[in-house]
Structure formats: C-alpha cells, structure tokens
Image (cartoon, rainbow, N blue to C red):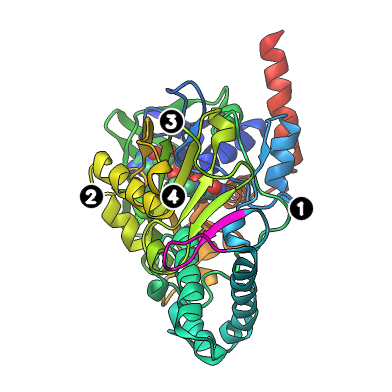
C-alpha cells in the first residue's frame, strides 16, 4: 500500500495548489483524480484549433487579486473582457425591449439607471432581512416601493432573477437574502485566449497525480487515514478532500467514521447550483462590431437573455450564452440540436433572418457530470456565510476540505478554490506559506526542465 505524508483527492485548482505547496515544503504527496485529466471545472477544449473554456473563463476583477498576481507572474496572456451584462452600463451592450425591439440610447440609459437605483436600495433591504428571507423576498420588497409601471419593474426583476441564476446557478427564491453579499468585482475582468486550464496544468507539473483514480471511501484513525480507490488503498497522515460540494452532497465519497456536524452541517445546508454554457459559431457576424453583450429584457429574455461576443478568442463570429438555475437544469435534458435551435429562435426574434445557422456549437452539462454534480456552490436559504469556511474542517487533525465551496470570502470562483488549497497547505504544515513563492517555484521548475 502506498503511504505518503498527504493525499489530496481531486486535481482541480484547489487540489493541485495544495499539493504543489506541500510538495514544495518537502512533503511526499499523491493526488488522486477520478477523471482522465486535471483541472476539474477549469476545462479547456482545444479540439477546434482554438481555446474553448467549458468551465471557468473569467477572473472577475483583477485589482488586489492574488490570483491575478499569480497569472501575471506566470506570464499567462489574458484579454480584458469585463462582463457588461452584470455591471449594466459598464461596457457597450445592445439592449432589446420586451417587444424584442432594439432600445435607443435614452431607454437603455433609463434601464441602467433603474437597475442601479434598485441595486442601491437592495443593500439596505438585505441588511434589514431576517433568517429565512430569500433574495426573491428582498428584491420584491425593493421593487414594490419603486412606484414604477409594471413593464419597468419587470425589466429590473428579470435582471435580478438572471443575476442570481448566473452568479449562483440557483433560482432566486432558493437563494438566501445574503447570497450575493460577496459578489463584488474590483477592476477589469479578463479571459484567457490560450485557455484557463493552463494555470492548473502549470501548477500541477511534476506532481505525482494518479488520473482515473476514483476515490470511494476515506477512513480515518488517530494516526492518519486510508483512502480507497479501485486501484488500491493509499495511506497518509493527512488527507485533503478537494472534490466539489455536489460530490459531497451526493455522498459519492463515504467517510468512516461519519463526518461530524461541524462539516456535515454545511455540506447539507449549502446549495450546489447549475450554470451551463452554450457556444455558437456563426457564418457571419450580425451584431455590431463593438458590442460586448447582446441582451433581451422582459419576456423575450425569459430564458435565453444575454449573449457575449467571444469572437476575439476563436477569430470567428462566436457568441456565448448561459443557461442557469432551473432553466439550466432543463437544458441539460435537451439534445444539442434542440438547444441550438432554441437559442437561434431567440436570436432571430431580435435580429431576424440576419442570424445564420450556426456552423459549430458546444453545450455543457455540468449538473450531469458525476465528478462535479453542479457548477458551483451558493448560500441556499437556511445556510450562512459561515458554512463555507466551516466546511474546510479540519476533522480530527487529519481531514481537511478544500475547493471553492470552502472559501467564504469568494466562493464559486477559481480564486476561492486556489486560496482554499493554500489554506489547507498552511494548516497541514503549520507554517505560513507565501503565495508569491508559488509562481517563483513553478517558473524555476520550468526553467530547470528546459535546461
Ligand atoms: C460553467 C462554469 C463556468 C465558471 N465560470 C467561472 C469563471 O468565469 N470564473 C471563476 O472564477 N469561476 C468560474 N467557475 C467556477 C470555477 O470553475 C470553480 O470554482 C473552480 O474551478 C473550482 O475548483 P475546485 O478545485 O474547487 O474544484 P474542481 O475544479 O471541480 O476540482 C475537483 C476535482 O475533484 C475530482 N473528483 C470528483 N470526485 C472525485 C472522486 N470521488 N475521487 C477523485 N477525484 C474526484 C474532479 O474530477 C475534479 O477534478 C465556473 C464553473 C463552471 C462550471
């Protein structure tokens, strides 16, 4: 049986960061990964000859971001792409009203002002909210007080609903009133023309990662833990469980003895949302050259509502749209052809026959992925911010949890997952580890490798 200092379960960004930092600190480490690839929810498909990020693609705000510092230090190229849709007014958008007609500059500005004023009122409403209040409750209270006509209210209501679906993968009535408290974006957002999975791959280089090793059981004792896979058992003093919350909620890994309440409670209370991507490549561009985002307000945007121009990456006219929350779960049950036809129908309501038949597409189904079982975590009604960090453990000084769901300051992100891997490594070594050393060590290893 293989015995090491630490076993890390899951080779997503949390797992490989933790393993890298532990190995750099002199530990023997094995990473057990169920898939035949690393990166988890950072998954770049390059089969078309360019990078298509099927999972994460953005750094949501590069100011004061250790993640950005790391990417920058590693010399990974990025492209500014600030998501105008959820910072209304931030970047050029093409807006369509509830009849599907293009909105002029004045009515677009009015909608942006409405969203911003409702959002400001929401801050106080959330502060006043009590246990059990949902994000739907607080947004409806704010909208009730505006005195606007029903159409104006509908257009802002739709924005709130879709924001929750996309940021949390959840229906607005299932999210706690505080569920978007951490959703602050500082500075520009960027995407990765070479593919975001370059980051976990470079961090992971040189680690002992056993791919296609599905972990089914973790049993701990006073002196360590035994981890069971179909390829045999592994033993270690410490185990870092860096699998997605969806996998833990499904009970796909058995813990012996059972997890204590301080960890099992958060696993039960936090929600795992669904957020899926649909990429469509068109024969010709039918939207304006400088538009970041096309967005349908009101009824025409009930399902498909926002399209992001990601042509800069492929060099071909390509739009990215999202299906999240309950609609995202529904879309997972549809065949690709049905999804594509549905999106094209929605676009033709706005642009007519200028919308050609797509020449290529990609549709994700993260909720059906057995090694993810959802897209990212959120604070469901009944959960609290504290549940995220409580989920990290440790348990009996042996078991640690890492991953986006364990990082309360910035859950549901690559940054949160990375920082949680760093925290687990510090807890295991009992020492402070400078995250800046990660880039230095990666570069040094790459330099030695190319000598
Ligand atoms: C469609 C989509 C878009 C997103 N967009 C963004 C974005 O733009 N910006 C952003 O910051 N974040 C985004 N996110 C979130 C981001 O991808 C995640 O927060 C982050 O990648 C999670 O990393 P992780 O290490 O916690 O988990 P993961 O990357 O999921 O890694 C967990 C690993 O555990 C493995 N595993 C699971 N079960 C087992 C088992 N039983 N045994 C062994 N291994 C197992 C999995 O295969 C996986 O490799 C997005 C996510 C999705 C799905």
Q: Which of marks 2 and 4 is in front?
A: 4
Q: Is mark 3 within 8 Å of ligand 1?
A: no
Magenta region: 93-103
Q: Are marks 2 and 1 in contact (CB under 8 Å)?
A: no
Q: Nearer the viewer, residue 214 or 374?
A: 374
Vertical order, 417 against 50 (above or below): below
SS of the residue under disc 1? loop
Q: How far apart are marks 1 and 4 (CA)?
A: 40 Å
- Is residue 418 rendered to the left or right of residue 258? right
Give the crowd class for mark 4: few <14, some 14-19, many >=20 residues within 10 Å.
some
Quick check: is the Cβ at mark 2 less than 8 Å away from ligand 1?
Answer: no
Vertical comparison of 343 with 305: above or below? above
Residue matched to label 3: 283
Residue found 48% across the figure and 73% down from its top: 155
Disc 4 designates what residue?
351
Taking the image as drawn, is residue 376 in sight?
Answer: yes
Residue under label 1: 64
Distance from disc 2 to disc 1, alpha carbons, whole Å, reads 40 Å
Position of the C terminus, as image quadrant, is: top right
Query: Separation of disc 3 and disc 1 at Cα?
Result: 40 Å
Our reading of the magenta stretch's main secondary structure is loop
Q: Is residue 299 magenta?
A: no
Q: Residue 226 carries which label?
A: none
Res. 333 mark: 2
Q: Which of marks 3 and 4 is nearer the N terminus?
A: 3
Q: In this view, does 186 lie above or below 17?
A: below
User: Residue 2 in the image: x percent, y percent?
Assistant: 41, 28
């Amino acid at each position: 049986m293989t015995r090491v200092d630490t076993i890390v379960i899951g080779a997503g960004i949390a797992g490989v960061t933790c393993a890298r930092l532990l190995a750099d600190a002199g530990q023997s480490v094995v990473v057990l990964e169920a898939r035949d690839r690393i990166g988890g929810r950072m998954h770049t498909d390059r089969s078309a000859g360019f990078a298509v990020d099927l999972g994460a693609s953005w750094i949501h705000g590069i100011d004061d971001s250790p993640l950005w510092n790391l990417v920058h230090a590693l010399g990974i190229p990025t492209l500014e792409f600030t998501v105008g849709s959820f910072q209304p007014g931030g970047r050029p958008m093409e807006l369509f009203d509830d009849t599907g007609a293009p909105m002029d500059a004045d009515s677009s500005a009015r909608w942006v002002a409405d969203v911003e004023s409702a959002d400001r009122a929401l801050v106080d409403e959330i502060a006043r909210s009590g246990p059990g209040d949902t994000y739907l409750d607080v947004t409806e209270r704010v909208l009730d007080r505006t005195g606007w006509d029903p159409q104006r209210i509908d257009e802002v209501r739709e924005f709130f609903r879709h924001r929750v679906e996309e940021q949390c993968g959840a229906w607005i009535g299932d999210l706690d009133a505080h569920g978007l408290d951490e959703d602050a974006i500082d500075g520009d957002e960027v995407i990765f023309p070479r593919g975001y999975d370059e980051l976990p791959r470079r961090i992971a280089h040189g680690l002992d990662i056993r791919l296609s090793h599905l972990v089914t059981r973790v049993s701990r004792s006073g002196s360590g833990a035994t981890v069971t896979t179909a390829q045999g058992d592994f033993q270690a003093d410490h185990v870092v469980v860096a699998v997605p919350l969806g996998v833990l909620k499904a009970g796909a890994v058995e813990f012996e003895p059972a997890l204590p309440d301080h960890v099992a409670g958060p696993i039960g209370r936090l929600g795992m949302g669904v957020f899926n991507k649909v990429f469509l490549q068109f024969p010709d561009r039918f939207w304006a050259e400088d538009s970041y985002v096309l967005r349908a307000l009101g009824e025409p945007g009930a399902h498909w509502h926002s399209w992001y121009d990601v042509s800069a990456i492929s060099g071909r006219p390509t739009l990215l749209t999202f299906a999240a929350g309950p609609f995202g779960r529904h879309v997972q049950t549809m065949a690709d052809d049905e999804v594509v036809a549905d999106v094209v129908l929605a676009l033709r309501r706005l642009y007519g026959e200028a919308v050609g038949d797509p020449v290529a597409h990609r549709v994700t189904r993260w909720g059906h992925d057995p090694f993810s079982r959802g897209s990212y975590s959120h604070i469901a009604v009944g959960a609290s911010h504290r549940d995220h960090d409580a989920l990290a453990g440790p348990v009996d000084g042996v078991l640690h949890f890492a991953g986006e769901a364990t990082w309360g300051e910035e859950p549901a992100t690559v940054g949160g997952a990375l920082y949680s891997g760093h925290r687990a490594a510090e807890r295991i070594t009992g020492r402070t580890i400078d995250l800046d050393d990660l880039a230095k060590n990666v570069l040094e290893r790459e330099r030695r490798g190319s000598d």
